[in-house]
Amino acid sequence: MKSIVKTAAVRLWVLLFSATGRNAWRDFSAIESQVGFDGILRVLEECDGEGAIALLRAGHATIGNRVRLLRGLALHNAEGSFAHLQIGDNCHIGRQVFVDLAAPVTIGCRATVSMRAMILTHMAVGDSKSTTGQNAQQCLSVVIHDDAYIGAGATILPGVTVGKGAVVGAGAVVTKSVEPETRVAGVPAKRI
């Protein structure tokens, strides 16, 4: 029953935004007190364009001008704030992009992150007692430089930097940083 009420509250906030315009998201704490931070994340997934951008800014993300943000942005490990997210001017963020904010994510100007791409900043093995797994845990920033292109369904792993003007092919799994003006594709991603 509680989840039904929260879902209804989320839909109400989406309707409120469309009825009142951009100013609906100015009081982030008032929204959070009504629907909780999980509710804000759900609202964000339901919004696109100026509504989503206004909500991200209200939650302390740094968002440039003329950013095109399509519906379905999923943020993970935001910890009550979007401060780890920075998106430059003239970026395109496609439908259903997943961004892990355990560490900072920076997306430069004029970059494209295509639909269903995933940007991961951490790896944790949970309660596993595996020594190998424990040694593999990490939490590292991801940087996507100006004019870079991330193809549909690509996965960017923790600590990766995608250089200026680089192209990551659709479905690629990027395990190492990509040099500027380079094209990579495949699993794991390799220069092509």
Image (tube, rainbow, N blue to C red):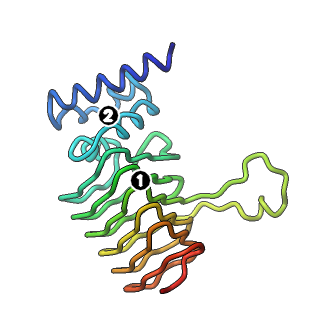
Residue sitting at x 52%, y 46%: 77
Residue type highlighted by circle 1: Val
The location of residue 137, given as percent across then percent down, is 70, 60
Q: Report which quarter residue 106 is drawn in.
A: bottom left
As drawn, 115 above or below 31: below
Q: Secondary structure at mark 2?
A: helix
Along the horizontal axis of the image, is 1 left or right of 124?
A: left
As drawn, 168 above or below 47: below
Residue sitting at x 77%, y 59%: 134
Q: Secondary structure at mark 1?
A: loop
The location of residue 156, given as percent across then percent down, is 51, 66
Residue type highlighted by circle 2: Phe
Question: CA gap, disc 2 to disc 1?
Answer: 22 Å
User: Residue 28 shows which numbered tag?
Assistant: 2
Q: Report which quarter residue 43 is drawn in.
A: top left
**Residue identified by numbered label 1:** 97
Residue sitting at x 15%, y 27%: 19
Q: Report which quarter residue 31 is drawn in.
A: top left
Along the horizontal axis of the image, is 71 left or right of 36?
A: left
For marks 2 and 1, the one nearer the N-term is: 2
